[in-house]
Amino acid sequence: MTYQETVSWMFAQLPMYQRAGKVAFKKDLTNIIAFSKALNYPEKKFKSIHVGGTNGKGSTSHMLASILQEAGYKVGLYTSPHLKSFTERIRINGDEIPKHKVSAFITKHQEFLEHQKLSFFEMTVGLAFDYFASEKVDIAIIEVGLGGRLDSTNIIIPELAVITNIGLDHTQFLGETLPEIAFEKAGIIKKNIPVIIGEKQPEVEKVFHKKAKENNSVLIFASDDDKVYQTDLLGDYQKANSKTAATAIKYLKGFEVFEKNIIAGLLNVVKNTNLKGRWQILQENPSVICDTAHNTEGLTLVLNQLKQEKYIKLHMVLGFVSDKKLEDVLPLFPKDATYYFCRPNIPRGLNEVVLQEKAAHFNLIGKKYTTVQKALQNALNNANQGDMIYVGGSTFVVAEII
């Protein structure tokens, strides 16, 4: 198969959660364990750091990779979802996995994948682990896909577990309360492996203490440290992520990483890892900013950042996925902005008519557009110098305009 045929085939297998939603969620590790065995346990052939949490786990993963790259190590990075190209999910020192490697891997294991009925995410995790093992990375940063306890990445025994924070997201899978969600996220804590928690939250602190004690794991809260690190990732909300990454590195044993590497790594995240979509400035006058924040906690941070920006008029290009609880997120948005409601081009994309009607209940007024591109183009047509255009609400909205 060609690369494009390969990716199309992968997408056509058991549904991809990001596109299809709940029907794609699997509640056990049977498949990934079987695949790991078929691949001769690649996850045991490289060291790793496991990164979970509700918000900031992607940024924190990229920060960790950047720091270790600055220290001279060969660093694998597995993240999800991708914005533009599938190969963004699997990188070594910022370079995406070659397309021919994706095709060769899937072709080689296609019979097993079909017979075992692996999901898109499960086969992608197997591909990443096999690639990191074959390329002999010094260490890989592995971002949890969804939850933690039952996530396909959770077959690794990492050097460190990192959990950024806990918020109400994916409640249909992880639980309706913060402690329930924290329990699922805490599932990546392993015996005798240190765990770094990014933010100390009273509602869930006991959950992490209990799990760490059960596993004889050292528990560290990064937010207890007063030191502030600068990062090239824009937005004040990245300060918490940079502190989490820096704290984690300090507890990583067997690797020589100096303070200068931490400082340089945090200042060169974009250059070292090619991260996109985090408070990314796409143009000036009028300024266009996009961000992939999509849940209550993430959007609160980003919209607070927006309040600090200077502009004459604010234009909001907004789209969501259909299973988003709009009553939780729409009240966060400013009522004095002009809205351009749109539907991201995926099966899960929320219809723009529905979004416009729901938004009106919260006094968010604007026109509807059938595509993200049409919405952005109309915003650009209407905006003047000194105005600001914000594009977001969903990773998939951002992906269409980067």
Image: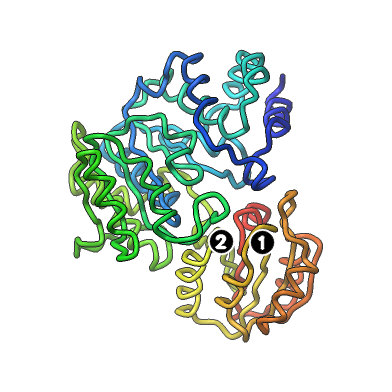
Name the residue located 77 percent from the left edge and 66 percent from the top edge. 352
**Closer to us: 383 or 75:** 75
The number of callouts visible is: 2
For mark 2, what is the residue? 294
Q: Residue 320 — which label?
A: 1
Name the residue located 19 percent from the left edge and 44 percent from the top edge. 218
Q: Are marks 1 and 2 in contact (CB under 8 Å)?
A: yes
Q: Position of residue 386 (x, y in %)?
A: 59, 81
Q: Residue 98 — which label?
A: none
Please rate how many residues cluster around mark 2, counting C-alpha atoms within 10 Å: few if below 14, some from 14 to 19, many from 20. many
N-terminal of the pair, mark 1 or mark 2, is 2
Work out how far the residue at label 1 is from the one at label 2, CA to CA, in angstroms.
8 Å
* Residue type at numbered disc 1: Phe
The image quadrant of residue 86 is: top right
Q: Position of residue 62 (x, y in %)?
A: 40, 46
Q: Is residue 267 above or below residue 145?
A: below
Please identify the quadrant where the C terminus is shown.
bottom right
**Closer to us: 94 or 283:** 94
Element carrying mark 2: loop
Is 72 displayed left or right of 311 in the figure? left
**Closer to us: 331 or 132:** 331
Please rate how many residues cluster around mark 1, counting C-alpha atoms within 10 Å: few if below 14, some from 14 to 19, many from 20. many
Q: How is the image coloured?
A: rainbow
Is 252 displayed left or right of 25 in the figure? left
Is 53 displayed left or right of 262 in the figure? right
* Residue type at numbered disc 2: His
Q: Position of residue 117 (x, y in %)?
A: 65, 24
Name the residue located 47 percent from the left edge and 46 percent from the top edge. 147
Element carrying mark 1: loop
The image quadrant of residue 132 is: top left
Name the residue located 28 percent from the left edge and 57 percent from the top edge. 206
Q: Is residue 362 above or below residue 49?
A: below
